[in-house]
Image (cartoon, rainbow, N blue to C red):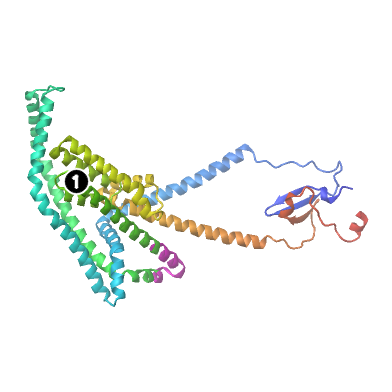
Amino acid sequence: MESRSQQPAVREGGRVSVRRDPAGGSVLSPVPVATVASRGTVIGNGLTWMAAWSLRIALIAVGLLLIGWLIGTFWVVVWPVVLAVLVATVLRPPAAWLIRYRFPPALASMLVLLVALGAISGLFVAIAPSVAGQTQQITNGVVAALGQIQQWIIGPPLNLGAGQVGDIINQVTQQLQASATSIAGGVLTGVSTVASGLVSLVLALVLTFFFVKDGPRFLPWLTAITGRSAGRHIAEVLSRIWAVLGGFIRVQALVSLIDAVFIGIGLVLLSVPLALPLAVLTFIGGFIPIVGAFVAGALAVLIALVTQGFTTAVLVLVLIVAVQQIEGNVLQPFLQGQSLQLHGAVVLLAVTAGGSLFNIAGAFLAVPVAAVLAVVLRYLGEQIDVRDQRFAEEVAADSEPPDEPDVIDGAEETVAIPASAAGDPAPQVPEPDGPAGAAER
């Protein structure tokens, strides 16, 4: 009789079972046949999986489009709220410091907000005389540059002639006169946009005051509204978002300040007009990654070209490129570290998408929004890992099989043994007790 240890082992779930044939391996034993899924079944399962995930992706896309439509519809409200949150992340720490020294929350928030507004206003008041005093020099430089371009067009290599240049200028003038109505409408639209921007700015300042004063009260309120279970997750995610946004704004401000200082010093040494306004523009442009630095640098090179000549423009370009490379490869990675964990390609795509959808405001908010999404995804990943770990612990606790008797099911007898013995070439199965076992022995 064939020994039981030579019977085949079959894995079932988390266990290994030994199946024995009553015929004892004789000619009456059925030939084992491996169960293999057909090609059609495999293709059908794959198509079902793809269809299910395609439906999920389509629903997610519809949800994102709906969210984008809602944001665009209520942009006049969303923009001041987002701007107020970003400013509050910077102003809340000094206000909290004052509150710890027994300042009333309202007084501390108002004091910090007024100091910030005074600093910004003082900066613009300081650069106004520089802009007014050097405007004539820039105008003369632009006129001289246009004259040189005209001489270059009339002479070689184009050799268009004065008559042809005059005809082109007349055509341009006629086109501008024909488009006077459209230009006037554009001017009115621009005035309306500026007025709406001022209203949004005032609303953002008021919201900033309330966010700075009552910021710590929002999380308990949300926890009470959403309940203890969901409120715990919401509070944790919002706390991380607040920390990430505050760190991003402060680090970006420091990096932009360093860029503005070094570029401003270089422009002063090269005697480029409007050095201080250009440095301020560089500081502001630093909050719009990649695009802001490019625009500020291009304007500085253009002013140097029309006022100081080609050589100075090249030197300004070298200065800006050198400062930007040091900032991008040394300062920003050192200061920000891995706090945002966003690749440069992700930042560039986010800025491009935000600028195309919401213009300058979108380009400004692109990186903070990407950082917020990254925080949410990381938290979801952490929760999934925690759940997987708990599930693995529960499975490990239940994986120890109890002593079970042999189960006879039809023509087969199944004996369950631990899965850890599956690697043995000849699993040892305990022999049954009683007369049958004695006779077999």
Considering the numbered disc 1 on the image, is that residue within a helix, a strand or a loop? helix
Q: Quadrant of residue 86?
A: bottom left
Q: Quadrant of residue 79?
A: bottom left
Residue drawn at point x = 64 percent, y = 60 percent: 396
Is residue 175 visible to us here?
no
Q: Residues within 10 Å of mark 1 (few under 14, many from 20)?
A: many
Which region of the structure is painted magenta? 223-238
The percent coordinates of residue 343 (x first, y second) are 40, 47
Dominant secondary structure, magenta: helix
Residue 232 forms part of the magenta stretch = yes
The percent coordinates of residue 97 (x first, y second) are 30, 71
Q: Amino acid at mark 1?
A: Leu
Residue reaching furthest to the bottom: 102
Residue reaching furthest to the front: 269
Mark 1 = which residue? 267
Placement of the C terminus among the 4 image quadrants:
bottom right
Query: Relative to 200, is 437 on the left or the right?
Result: right
Residue drawn at point x = 8 percent, y = 49 percent: 133
The percent coordinates of residue 297 (x first, y second) are 23, 43
Residue 227 forms part of the magenta stretch = yes
The residue closer to the viewer here, 76 or 327, is 327
